[in-house]
Amino acid sequence: MPALPRLRAALTAPVDAASLIAFRSTANRVSTNGDANQEIFLWSATGPTTTQVTATTGGASDGVSLSSDGTRLVFKSNRDVVGGGNTDLTNEIFAYEVGGAVTQVTDTPVGGGGNRFPVLAGDGSSLAFESDRDVTGSNADHNFELFRTACGLEVTMTADQAAVVVGEPVDYHVTVHNGGALALTGVYLDATGAPACNQFVGDLASGASTTVDCSYVATLADVGTHTNAVVADAGRASTKRRQRSSSYSTP
Ligand SMILES: [Ca+2]
Ligand SMILES: [Ca+2]
């Protein structure tokens, strides 16, 4: 059976190449999981060391996916992993930059099954996951949909005015930041309610930020409190990354 050793070598090659294995466990492997809940661990052949990525009490962190280049992993958790980002303990997606910090990718309220089954692209540049939450403002019926998002992309939105009259502009400042370790290409903003903010940003190096200034003129249809939202993403795919919004009142 000369083919069998070659087959075994082929199957183990991806793990050996990255020298990393990510897994979930209830074991107290490095003496920091005394409550024996499900935590995410990362084993490195080059240490050899075992890193406990999550440190939570109760609940579960699982569904881990490691990029084949070993730069980051993603997982699902119903714990407040980062601290303050998931106090309602719903199923959210988190990312861990290997050797760095854990960040929370999704942020959704109580209801349904939440966000689950995250899978990273081989180069760690993006992830896909399943969710029955209204992650990007386009799933109001809350069935399970697939979402894709660039990794490391963060967006914030502020408005100069808290209230305007009809015919006056609301001036927005949308800041996009690449908080990940990899450069992002083809970053763009999608703001269907405020067309002037619907802009192509371009490439963002790791750690780079850029701010887009744009305005929206209030109309009669906006009387009351109106919310405009903007999402940012990278690459050519059409699904969105983080959503940020800003509200104003029109008397
Ligand atoms: Ca624990
Ligand atoms: Ca939540």
Image (spheres, helix red, strand yellow):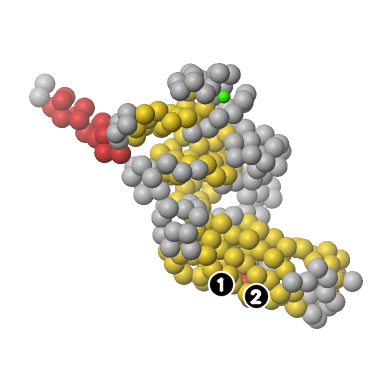
Q: Locate residue 75, reporting x and y percent.
A: 50, 37
Q: Which residue is drawn at 62% across and 67% down?
A: 174
In the structure shown, which secondary structural element does the residue marked by tag 1 occupy? Answer: loop
Please state which of residues 102 and 15 is positioned toward the viewer in this rendering: 102
Callout 2 amino acid: Cys
**Decide: marks 1, 2 in contact (CB < 8 A)?**
yes
Q: Which residue lies furthest to the right in this view?
A: 251
Residue that label 2 marks: 214
* Quarter of image, res 203: bottom left
Residue that label 1 marks: 199
Callout 1 amino acid: Gln
Neighbourhood count class around disc 2 (C-alpha, 10 Å): few under 14, some 14–19, many 20 upward? some
Left/right placement of residue 39 relative to residue 244 reads left
Q: Which of the two discs, 1 and 2, sits closer to the camera?
A: 2
Q: Residue at x 36, y 49 (%)?
A: 123
Neighbourhood count class around disc 1 (C-alpha, 10 Å): few under 14, some 14–19, many 20 upward? some
Q: Is residue 159 visible?
A: yes
